[in-house]
Image: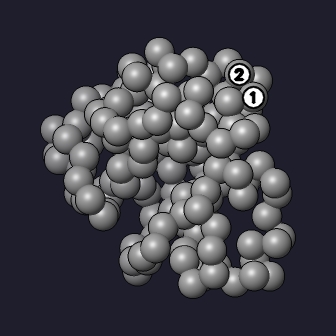
Amino acid sequence: MQALTIHEPWATLLVKGKKQFETREWQRNYRGLLAIHSGKQSVDIEDYPLGLSEILDDSKITQDNLNNNKGKIIAIATLKEIHLMTDKFINEQSELERLTGFWEPRRFAWELTNIKPLPQPIAARGMPGLWTVPDNIYVQIQQQLGN
């Protein structure tokens, strides 16, 4: 299984269903199961762009929630598709989606579906790019999801 490290609050917003795409400047050929790893870096809620702190409040996401997720695999998703961003594609996205990503032509929108939060997030060392989940962590994921 591959994993992607995503900084907070973006990782939690994906898991809570507040965003569907993770925006990146690169793409890969990989499609399939993807572990969502919450990176160790984040921005304090007070420093988020206008509107984002209200979204977090409405979703009952606190700074403590975000801090507790850092450095852990928090969910499993399906990487369905990676879309090349065009002006047309960007304009088709909701205001919320555009607020929670870096939308610019020639970047990429990673479409994530079937997101399943882990009941007990699993500590793991993240890496840049896509990385392979270690076997022992993969077993823990499978046990939590009842597979």
Residue 81, position as x, y percentages in the image:
57, 72
> Tag 1: residue type?
Glu
Q: Are marks 2 and 1 in contact (CB under 8 Å)?
A: yes
Q: Which residue is mark 1?
A: 54
* SS label for mark 1: helix
Quarter assignment of residue 104: bottom right
> Tag 2: residue type?
Asp
State the mark number for residue 57: 2
Residue 79, position as x, y percentages in the image:
51, 62
State the mark number for residue 65: none
Q: Is residue 30 above or below residue 116?
A: below
Circle 2 crowding by C-alpha within 10 Å: few under 14, some 14–19, many from 20: few
Q: What is the number of callouts on the image?
A: 2
Q: Residue at x 58, y 69 (%)?
A: 109
| 14 horizontally vs 132: left or right | right
Residue 131, position as x, y percentages in the image:
25, 59
Work out whether residue 27 or residue 95 is closer to the camera in this orientation and state it.
Answer: 95
Q: Residue at x 54, y 77 (%)?
A: 107
| 77 horizontally vs 96: left or right | left
Quarter assignment of residue 130: bottom left
